Amino acid sequence: MSNKFNKIQFQIAALTLALALSLILSACQSATPSEATEVAPAEPVTLKLALLPIIDTLPILVAQQEGLFEANNVNVEVIPVASAAERDQVITSGQADGMINEALSTMFYNKDQTQVQIVRFARASSPEHPLFWILASATSGINSADGLKNVEIGVSEGTIIEYITDRLLEKEGLSSDEIKNLAVPKIPDRIALLGTGQLKAATLPDPAASLAMQQGAMSILDDSKYPELSLSTLAFRKPFIDQNPQAIQNFLKAIEEAVVRINEDPAKYTNLLVEQKVLPAPLAETFQVPPFITAGVPDEAHWNDVLAWAKAEGLLAEDVSYSESVTTEYLP
């Protein structure tokens, strides 16, 4: 009986030891890096962008069309807007996370607290490719900046358009008293009034400026002569940035890849601009897609000049912090 009991005890002990060894081996195997289970990538974050129909959107359109956002694990949803006012309403209500705007717009958002941050250039003027033109009606008889003294110029008041108009004419020697801006908020209205001669001059961005010139308007001055004045930016709501820093990085990486593709073959993307109703079809044969600026943000000198203009115009009462409004943290 004793021998039988000892045998049973031995068998139980052997089984226990075997089980223990099996568990130890299993643990060792699961801890081996080569056998470790791969961590699934995080679900892509969706970035909602409020976008005007402007050339500056091209890198976003290219990244969408060519799968660059998907390759960088982000989704982008475009919310079309017809005006800067509509864009700002969409952002303020939280219906969109980001936008293409400019330094002045960001200052208005951040005058009391930091609500949005600029994370990258969208587009910038260069000596070869302007962003804004001051045009004169074909019937105006104006052919120089000096001829714009005391002439009403159609602009959208309190915007980058008015800033550009003032600064360009000041650099050409006009005094502030000789610059007469007239509020014509909608771009199509400016083009129409310029075409009929009811407006002697107007400031327009591209491609509206190219269309107006095709219809007979005369180019008097553009920002290619003073490229430091003109740029647009990509900006996002600060709470969205704080909650999704990796998504912002991934988005900007995709934008950078799109910019490289555009700059390698700009003409390839003319039809895309027409399809997306950014470029009027009559311009498709003649319009030259501009190169796009690579990763970077506006410098403090530009910020301070826009701020000084806004304060002088009574649009802002206090300084707005550059360091809190502009960040390079997420650039590739």
Image: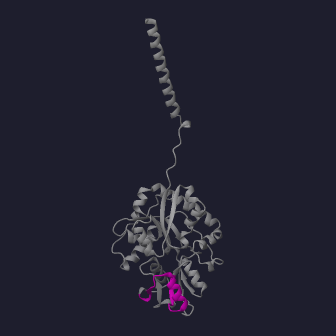
Front residue of 315/99: it is 99
Is residue 91 depicted above or below 20 in this figure?
A: below
Q: Is residue 285 left or right of residue 118?
A: right
Q: Nearer the viewer, residue 44 or 1?
A: 1
Viewer can see residue 144: no
What is the quadrant of residue 105 in the picture? bottom left
Count all numbered tags in the image, as a single digit: 0
Q: Can you say whether 279 is above or below 190 in the image?
A: above
Find out whether residue 237 is within the magenta segment.
no
Q: Where in the figure is residue 36, as x and y percent of width and height?
A: 53, 38
Residue at 55% from the left image edge and 55% from the top image edge:
72
Residue at position x 46%, y 13% from top? 8
- Give how far across and how far down residue 37 sits, in percent: 53, 40
- Residue 306 rendering spot, x and y as whole percentages: 43, 74
Residue in the image at 59% along x and 69% along y? 291
Which residues are drawn in magenta?
177-203
Is residue 194 one of those drawn in magenta?
A: yes
Q: Is residue 322 above or below residue 158?
A: above
The residue most toward the front is: 1
Q: Is residue 161 shown left or right of residue 278?
A: left
The answer to which of 8 and 120 lies nearer the viewer is 8
Looking at the rendering, in which quadrant would you find the N terminus?
Answer: top left
The residue positioned 47% from the left and 87% from the top of the image is 153
Look at the image and tell me whether residue 307 can be seen: yes
Q: How is the image coloured?
A: one colour
Q: Residue 170: x and y, percent? A: 46, 83
Q: Is residue 291 left or right of residue 314?
A: right
